[in-house]
Image (tube, rainbow, N blue to C red):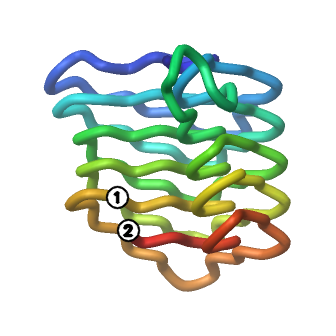
Amino acid sequence: LGGAIHHSSDSSTLIIGGNVRIQGNLAQIAGGGIFSAGTTILMLSGVTFESNGAGFLVFGHVSEGGGLHLVGATASIDACTFAHNFAVNGGGIFLLDSKVNITGGVMAYRNVAAAEGGFLCVRDGSDVHLGPGTNISLNVAGSGGGVTLD
């Protein structure tokens, strides 16, 4: 869980900003770039998630969130790029029971999900806001090449 960063302390805040690259990481099950779970707050600004992945099928678990995987978390994603990330569900981002605000010209391109949500897979009580300037293009999935709301 969390190829580059694993963030799961309850009531903690993780802030990452300013020309940071999270690139080429692999998690066996979830969150190739970042895995964040619990009552956590994640604030991302100007971060590039590129070529991260969650392994396709490990020990009977389906992989989720090639770039970012959130469970029960709250996040703001501003002016970030998600490119060339992969997983079974949510090639770029996977959300489970989370609240996310995506703003400031987020770019999402060429992310791949074998099943659902090439860029974004939203599940079970998650709330997501896609703000102005968000560009979702050239993503691929079995269903919902750009976004799947389930």
Crowd around label 1: few <14 · some 14–19 · many ≥20 (10 Å): some
Give the label on residue 115, or none. Answer: none
Q: Position of residue 19 (x, y in %)?
A: 73, 39
Residue 129 appears left or right of 32: left
Residue 45 appears in the picture as rendered: yes
Q: Quadrant of residue 21?
A: top right
Q: Position of residue 139 (x, y in %)?
A: 78, 66
| Residue that badge 2 annotates | 150
Residue 39 lies, with reference to residue 121, above or below; the image says above
What's the residue type where badge 1 is placed? Arg
Q: Residue at horizontal 62%, vertical 19%?
A: 27
Residue 37 lies, with reference to residue 81, above or below; the image says above
Q: Residue at horizontal 27%, vertical 60%?
A: 126
Q: Position of residue 98 (x, y in %)?
A: 27, 51
Q: Nearer the viewer, residue 130 or 14?
A: 130
Q: Quadrant of the C terminus?
A: bottom left
Residue 4 appears in the picture as rendered: no
What's the residue type where badge 2 is placed? Asp
| Residue that badge 1 annotates | 123
Residue 21 appears left or right of 31: right
Q: Position of residue 71 (x, y in %)?
A: 31, 38
Q: Are marks 1 and 2 in contact (CB under 8 Å)?
A: yes
Cα distance between the residues tagged 1 and 2: 5 Å
Q: Nearer the viewer, residue 58 or 119?
A: 58
Q: Check disc 1 and report its element: helix, strand or loop.
A: strand
